[in-house]
Amino acid sequence: MGVKVRLRKSYYEAEDSKRRRDRAKGRAKTGAKIEAKKAFMLDVSFEMENELVVLFGPSGSGKTTLFKCISGITDPDCGNITVNNKVYYNKNNKINLPIQKRNLGYVFQNYTLFPHMDVRKNIECGLKNWNKESREERVMEMMSLLHIEELEKRYPFQLSGGQKQRVALARALAPRPELLLLDEPFSALDKGIKTEFIEKIKSLQNKLKIPLLFITHSLEEAFMLADRVLVMHGGKIQQFGTLDEISYHPENRHVAELTGLSNLFDDARVVGYDEISKSTVLMSGDLKIRINSLELNPGNLISWGIHPEDITFLLPGSEDQDKNIYQAYVSSVINKGPKKKITVKLIRHYKTLIAEVPAQFVESLRLSAGDSCLIKMEMSKVVVF
Amino acid sequence: MIPMLDQIWFPLSITLWIATMSSLLVLCSGVVIAYIFARRDFRGKKLAELLVTLPLVLPPTVIGYLLVILVGKNGFIGHLIFNVLGTGIMFTRQAAVIAAYTVSLPLMVRTAQAAIEAVDKELEYAAYILGRSEIETALLITLPLAKRGILAGLVLSFARAVGEFGATLMLAGNIPGKTNTMSISIYSAFQAGNNELAQVLVLILVLMSLLFIALTGKIASREKFEV
């Protein structure tokens, strides 16, 4: 059971006719096939159970293209796609199930409700071979599940963004899909409705027990929704793991940056393991940092970082590098909603860090630009990769 | 000289009959052609598009001549028709329908094609994903959403068929009581110096044209769904 995907798809740069002719000529001369210049390649492989997986990555990372391959809107170049033991696509066995036979639900980014049909007709569209009674029953069931009964006779242009989204979800779920694909369904919603929908989608997934893939480029949404997160960048899966894994054990720089690790340094060298404090010592420039990780070879050059929320401020005192406590001064304080973003400079180490702390905390410490302060990076919170 | 009712009634009825027949044919075939042009890719598509559009720019006499070659007794199609019906169709009202169809088809195809191309492809994919076949999707989603373009194409084709003169004259001739359409009757009345008849016929055509313009305006201003 579950979803197995392994596929590759290339996109080529648009060629003008002259370049295409030249390429054809070149092939005629050498007999070798000359490929057009590749612009983008999607190359992914993953497996999931009946769970909610968030596809997280910047725009242009291939998330929607992956959805189009799974749903059959475009064909991959090679690979295979299997959902609940049903083969959707297999290049080697020449299987390519038509879109209509794939039985999945797809909510497009702009909802794609049929503008000339009312809400009921939209939901009914997927219930092609159902008899009249069961079809009506199913529509009612879907409308009550998503609380849209009163919208039955409305047309899409009479609906708000949130309502359209409910209708799109009802339409996608009505034919009992085996897999649900949601492409940034929240991008057009207000923040308040968003939180409500995130709860709704989580409970729906719990109830239906079908695999659910959810595209987003918002870190916040990913954190609120996911069991597991599939981080994509440049057409490739960078990491597939739980929130804790991708935030505190990123596999590479892309993942670290995407998960909001804005304090990133590439100049650390592993000094060695300290038996007494049970920690590994790094030197980043002349900054000594202790971390909890064990499997690092002395002498290795590694990258380290810390999330802005994981930097804590202490009452004034003295620097203690063995406890990751450093002297610093505040270079700026910026409001960021209920939180404040504080830029601090480490006094003797020429490093700048960004911290995020609750506003009330900043007020009680009376921190403002120019003040000196003492910061701490918890050993377990320092990220290395 | 007061024109006799029959002198007005017959050209009007034959013109309406020809335009209706031609428009029905244009509707059936034009929408299919427009859908294929808008949604499918095949070898020689550019050439096919060119051939369908050609009558829009060809001089009517050239169209008439080419049609005579095709539909005439020795032409490929004419020969086929002769074998089936046992009689030729040159100089009949059916020939006039063929002439009107040829010149008005491009108007329908171009307008409907543009309207179909403007339908968001994602809506079609959404229907496929909901299990609908391509034909069902075309009938349920694409064509209803392109309805305004198709209706506009239909009005244009009908108007063009009503006004058709050159190719009709060459293919169907000017046989009184048989193929003398409005346009042709105006010309022959004018030639014969029967100005009263010409004026009445002209007046009727002007009124019909005004009606067409009002009709297209009404289609264009109809309630629009926001997508």
Image (spheres, coloured by chain):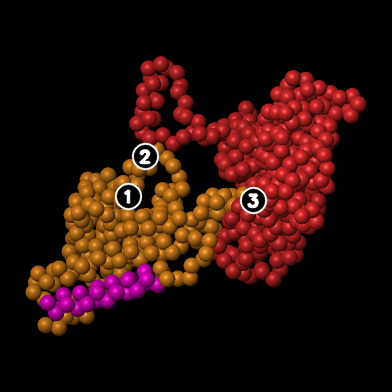
Chain colours: A red, B orange
Q: Magenta span: helix, strand or loop, mainly? A: helix
Q: Chain of mark 2?
A: B
Q: Chain of mark 3?
A: A
State the residue in front, B56 or A76: A76
Q: Residues within 10 Å of mark 2 (few under 14, many from 20)?
A: few
Same subunit, labels 1 and 3: the answer reads no
Q: Is residue A138 at least partly visible in the picture? A: no
- Please report contact status of discs 1 and 3: CB closer than 8 Å, yes or no: no
Q: Looking at the figure, which quarter contains the C terminus of chain A?
A: top right
Q: Looking at the figure, which quarter contains the N terminus of chain A?
A: top right
Disc sitting over residue B44 in the figure:
2
| Residue that carries the numbered disc 1 in the rendered image | B52
For residue B164, above or below residue A282:
below
| Residue A45 appears left or right of B148 | right
Instruction: State which region is magenta.
Output: B195-218
Of discs 1 and 3, which sits in the foreground? Answer: 3
Q: Amino acid at mark 3?
A: Glu
Disc sitting over residue A184 in the figure:
3
Alpha carbon distance from label 1 to label 3: 43 Å
Q: Residue at x 32, y 74 (%)?
A: B211
State the residue in front, A217 or B74: A217
Residue sitting farthest toward the top: A30
